[in-house]
């Protein structure tokens, strides 16, 4: 019996020694596993596992389980979280140059945004991360943001005046809303559903995939398809992890992140195509044709401010991407 146990133990030990060591990568994001962030993160994880022959494997923390996006980025910086899939909303607080991509009405459409971020401009922005203790693996996507509220149908900027609107903790967004006469309430995403439910704020703005997965239709009646700003996202990791990787594994992580980004963008497209009807069915009244030019015009004054802060030539360079 004793001998038998010893042999069994030796056998298990042998198997453990032969199996390559597996490193668990903790990844966090704001929304549910079936949302765009969930789809993108899962593809990233699967590809990473496959491309490293299982030496790296993910443990996912969806639904803001590890806090808001700002907190998750801080955790990556500190090394207590390995990867975050986050909107750029709070990223400008860490890497100021990234604020430029959150300017309202900067990107014409999805093609324009994706092409810009996947090209030299996006690469140059990602190159700003390492000096801030972060590595931006690849651009993913949150989507064009639309306005919802619980009070009345919004068609023009005037209709927004007087509404208490939650914004991200992003100074570009805060300034833009102030410029149309709205006093924004910056707030972390995990607090938002309850704030809408309790009427602490009347409205918020987010892409369709977020409005769907966060079930905002339960607490918001009106959806206006303003598309006022494109909301990029990123897979971000920490230098502590990155610097340990072999060149081949770095490549595996980068390729996996690109695949994750592509899957996330596809999910955004799918949600845009099917989600608006779903939100109608869930009881929302959808204003599909707000006065877009009026919103654009209302935000024009703050553009000269952005030009000063982020460089008129940098803004123009983005606009010129065809
Ligand atoms: O990234 O804070 C926000 O409104 C974000 O769009 C959301 O967390 C998904």
Image (cartoon, rainbow, N blue to C red):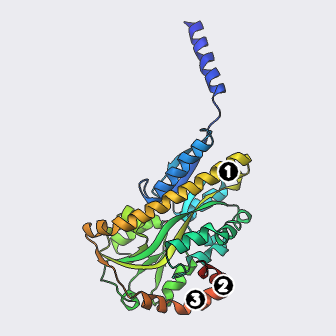
Q: Secondary structure beneath disc 2?
A: helix
Is residue 175 toward the left or the right of residue 95 in the image?
Answer: left
x and y percent of residue 225 in the render?
38, 78
Q: Residue shown at 57%/79% (left/top)?
A: 171
First reached walking from the N terminus: tag 2 or tag 1: 1
Is residue 96 toward the left or the right of residue 185 in the image?
Answer: right
Label 1 belongs to which residue? 251
Q: Residue shown at 64%/48% (left/top)?
A: 252
Q: Which mark is residue 45?
A: none
Q: CA distance from mark 1 to mark 3?
A: 39 Å
Q: Residues within 10 Å of mark 1 (few under 14, many from 20)?
A: some
**Can you tell me whether the CB of the residue at mark 3 lies under 8 Å from the nearest atom of ligand 1?**
no
x and y percent of residue 242 in the render?
70, 52
Q: CA distance from mark 2 to mark 1?
A: 35 Å
Label 3 belongs to which residue? 303
Q: Quadrant of the C terminus?
A: bottom right
Is residue 247 toward the left or the right of residue 159 in the image?
Answer: right
Would residue 36 be visible to someone looking at this image? yes
97 is higher (above) or lower (below) than 295 = above
Which-is-in-front pick, marks 1 and 3? 1
Label 2 belongs to which residue? 309
x and y percent of residue 27 in the render?
55, 52
Circles 2 and 1 in contact, beta carbons < 8 Å:
no
224 is higher (above) or lower (below) than 262 = below
First reached walking from the N terminus: tag 1 or tag 3: 1
């Amino acid at each position: 019996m004793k001998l038998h146990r010893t042999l069994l133990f030796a056998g298990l030990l042998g198997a453990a020694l032969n199996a390559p060591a597996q490193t668990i990568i903790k990844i966090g994001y704001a929304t549910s596993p079936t949302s765009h962030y969930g789809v993108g993160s899962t593809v990233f994880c699967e590809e990473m596992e496959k491309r490293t022959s299982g030496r790296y494997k993910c443990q996912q923390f969806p639904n803001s389980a590890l806090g808001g996006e700002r907190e998750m980025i801080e955790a990556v910086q500190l090394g207590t979280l390995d990867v975050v899939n986050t909107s750029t909303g709070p990223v400008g607080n860490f890497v100021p140059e990234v604020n430029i991509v959150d300017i309202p009405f900067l990107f014409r459409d999805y093609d324009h945004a994706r092409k810009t971020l996947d090209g030299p401009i996006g690469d140059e922005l990602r190159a700003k991360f390492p000096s801030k203790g972060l590595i931006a693996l690849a651009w993913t996507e949150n989507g064009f943001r639309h306005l919802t509220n619980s009070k009345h149908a919004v068609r023009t900027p005037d209709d927004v005046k007087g509404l208490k609107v939650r914004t991200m903790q992003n100074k570009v967004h805060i300034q833009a809303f102030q410029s149309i006469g709205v006093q924004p309430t910056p707030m972390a995403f995990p607090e938002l559903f309850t704030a809408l439910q309790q009427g602490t704020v009347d409205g918020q703005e987010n892409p369709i995939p977020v409005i769907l997965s966060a079930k905002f239709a339960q607490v918001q009646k009106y959806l206006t398809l303003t598309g006022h700003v494109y909301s990029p996202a990123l897979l971000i990791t920490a230098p502590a992890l990155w610097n340990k990787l072999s060149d081949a594994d770095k490549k595996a992580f980068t390729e996996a992140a690109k695949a994750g980004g592509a899957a996330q963008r596809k999910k955004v497209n799918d949600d845009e195509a099917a989600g608006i009807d779903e939100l109608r069915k869930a009881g929302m009244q959808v204003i599909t044709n707000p006065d877009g030019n009026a919103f654009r015009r209302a935000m024009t004054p703050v553009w000269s401010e952005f030009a000063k802060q982020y460089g008129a030539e940098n803004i123009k360079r983005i606009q010129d991407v065809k």
